[in-house]
Structure formats: C-alpha cells, structure tokens
Amino acid sequence: MEIRRFEISGLCLLTPRRFEDDRGLFAEVFNARALTEVLGPDAVFVQDNLSRSRRAGTVRALHFQKPPNAQGKLVRVSQGAIRDVAVDLRVGSETYGHHLGVDLVADDLELFWVPPGFAHGFVTLAPDTEVTYKTTAYYSPEDEAGIAWDDPDLAIDWGVTAENAVLADRDRVQPAFADLGAPFEVSRG
C-alpha cells in the first residue's frame, strides 16, 4: 500500500496495490494488520457507514464527535467522486484551524485517513456518488457536533457556491469555527 502523508499531522492518503488484466481488477482495500502498522494501534474500526448522494454539489459537512467518543474515519469512494475535507480541531497543534482537501475518485481506490481530532466533510463532484467509511468509535448522538461548512475563517474551497450547494438543514445552522471552543487538545509530553 502506498502512503502519502501531509503537512497536517495525522492525515494520510492510502493507495492500495492494483492487479489488472483482461478480466478486470483486484485490490486489497482493507487489511487490519497493514493499517495498524501505518495508522497505529488505536485505529481499530468498529462501524462501517455508507453515504449515497444523488446530485453533484451535495455537501455533507463538517461533522465530528467529541471525546470520549471521538471518531477516526477511513474514507473511500465506491462510486463517483468527492472533495473530502478535514479541519484540524486539536488545540495546541501547529496546524490548529487548518484544513486539507483531497479529491477522491472511485476508480483510484484511495482511502483517506482522518484521525480523531478533526472535523470531516465532503462535497460530491459527480451524481450518484457513494462513499463508505469505517469509524474507530460508534455513533454517539450526544457527542455529535459540527462547524459551519462555509465559515469564512476556514476559507475552504468546496468547488460549489452556497447557492448551488445541496445541504441538510442541520448543516445550514452549524456554529462558526471561532465559537467552537476546545473539543480536542494536543497532549504535551
């Protein structure tokens, strides 16, 4: 598996090895042992989620779960394409408040690792897009939180205007990043 790391500590893009011939394609897209070596022993996955969006420009953002049920997410597009975004919410991190966006396309088979301590969201770049992701904690409604997807302080380029974005009602009313507080802190040892 090829691993691409980024300036924001913890985020990485994983590309499985592909084996193609005239019959088609084979790739091992999940291997717990290999992922533990890359992501560390805390990356134990307990839940799989599926998101299917009919229209391009559907924004599903920016969500996270607070401790003690913070989730790491291993994201993959199984059909279509997305721009996937992670925002560093770890107070004390050198990249606190910074974000990273990566485009994921089903045919590329890439997996984007978003560890606990980040808000996560995506916008669909193609109709009928399907996203699957594994989480390291179970869904906990009481720990769920979010921030405004179009917060001017974050200045995320989603590739879609507010007028054309397809949003859930809850994503229209998320608080500003500046009002978030400190749900995650970097431990200094």
Image (cartoon, rainbow, N blue to C red):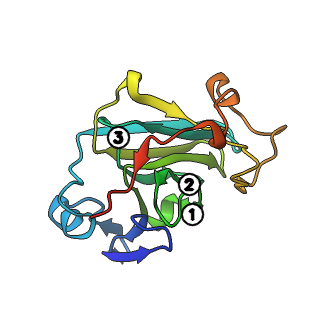
Residue holding disc 2: 84
Outermost residue toward the front in this view: 189
Amino acid marked by disc 3? Ala
Give how far apart the Cα atoms at labels 1 and 3 are. 22 Å
On screen, residue 126 above or below 171:
below
Which-is-in-front pick, marks 2 and 3?
A: 3
Q: Residues within 10 Å of mark 2 (few under 14, many from 20)?
A: many
Residue holding disc 3: 70
* Secondary structure found at label 1: strand
Q: Residues within 10 Å of mark 3 (few under 14, many from 20)?
A: many
Nearer-N-terminus badge (1/3): 3
Q: For the N terminus, give its image quadrant.
A: bottom left
Amino acid marked by disc 1? Val
Which-is-in-front pick, marks 1 and 3?
A: 3
On screen, residue 137 above or below 141:
below
Give x and y (percent) for residue 92: 46, 58
Amino acid marked by disc 2? Asp
Give x and y (percent) for residue 35: 23, 64
Mark 2 vs 1: CB contact within 8 A: yes
